[in-house]
Image: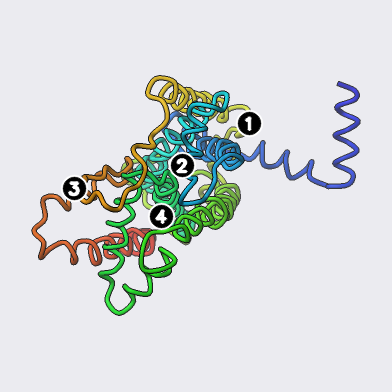
Amino acid sequence: MRMIKSIGDWLDARLQLGKTIRETMEHPVPRKSASWFYVFGSAALAVFLLQIATGIMLALIYVPSAGEAWNSLQSLNHNVALGWFIRGMHGWGSDFMVIVLIHMVQVFLFGAYKYPRELTWVVGVFLLLVTLGMAFTGQVLRFDQDAYWGLGIGASIASRVPLMGHWIVNLMLGGPIIAGATLSRFFALHVFVIPGLLIALVGVHLLMVLKLGINEWPMPGRIVRKATYLKEYHELTAKEGVPFVPDAIWKDLIFSAVILLSVAACALYFGPIGPSGPPDPTIIQTAPRPDFFFLWLYAVLSFLPPSMETPFLLIGPVVVMICILFLPFVFGEV
């Protein structure tokens, strides 16, 4: 213990992080907010860290080449010790990132998008969109029959964008067809670009949570008034607040551990997701099955008449995203 303290003192004298870390750990939260309803954000962060760790291990073996991608995944499944389990953890971890959506629903129901946390909500919306981007690019990297034709459907949807459709498809595929350049682009997106965006957005999101605090437990009749809210919130945390460590964090740790164990259980029981047969553009009688995040889209499209597909795909999501983004600015202040 003496050696650990000496090392800590040596680092703190040079990095000056001790005070910041203590303030972060001890920042007060409303007593009622230290409950099981507030654990979804921490669980989403835990799954994201799992995705980073397993993704780095997979990238050491995966070959982003049209001719070798499928073979490298087969090698991971059968020739690398615990390679199938790491793939399973990464694949099922992607599905468990749906907890981001659950977290947003909880924030909405508790009114935590209101003043002064409007930008925290906006950053959370972008986190959801980037998470969907991670899921889609990860499916493409399997480069099996489902991934090949699923990407073809995605490119077909992108081509319907007025004026810019052809340009978007060429940017996405690296040319007019799905080929080796396509896989290289999606590998760069999945491993470098989108994770970089996620890390930056997560950092900003956590910083705002620390600066603005965790919203208090919702009460019937309580109105968020911009003129008095901050004063009332600080009075509440000073009177009834508890430090995040240790009073609140233990629930976050337990729930995050349960989620991670559930991911591991799915990986052990169900195994990795794919790859199915190698991609073959000559087989056109196929029914690609999308990953969990996009099943709803395929289900809706199967019921829509052809004349409604383009309006639904191009107008519907944009309208929904605009409504979600501007929600706190319309209903968040009094």
Confirm or deny contact between disc 1 and disc 4 (CB under 8 A).
no
Q: Which mark is residue 245?
A: 1
Residue beneath label 4, please?
129
The image quarter containing residue 60 is: top right
Instruction: State the image coordinates of residue 74 (x, y, percent, origin top left).
Output: 46, 34
Q: Is residue 167 above or below residue 201?
A: below
Confirm or deny contact between disc 3 and disc 1 (CB under 8 A).
no
Q: CA distance from mark 2 to mark 1?
A: 17 Å
Q: CA distance from mark 3 to mark 2?
A: 55 Å
- Earlier in the chain: of badge 1 and badge 4, it is 4
Q: Secondary structure at mark 1?
A: helix
Q: Which mark is residue 216?
A: 2
The answer to whether residue 114 is seen in the rendering is: no
Q: Residues within 10 Å of mark 1 (few under 14, many from 20)?
A: some
Q: Secondary structure at mark 4?
A: helix
- Earlier in the chain: of badge 3 and badge 2, it is 2
Residue beneath label 3, please?
285
- Earlier in the chain: of badge 2 and badge 1, it is 2
Q: Secondary structure at mark 3?
A: loop
Please report the residue visible at 57 percent of the width from the left and 24 percent of the height from the top: 81
Confirm or deny contact between disc 3 and disc 2 (CB under 8 A).
no
Q: Residues within 10 Å of mark 2 (few under 14, many from 20)?
A: some
Q: What amino acid is found at the position of numbered circle 2 in the picture?
A: Glu
- Left or right side of 153 for 7: right
Instruction: State the image coordinates of residue 3 (x, y, percent, origin top left).
Output: 90, 25
Q: What amino acid is found at the position of numbered circle 4 in the picture?
A: Leu
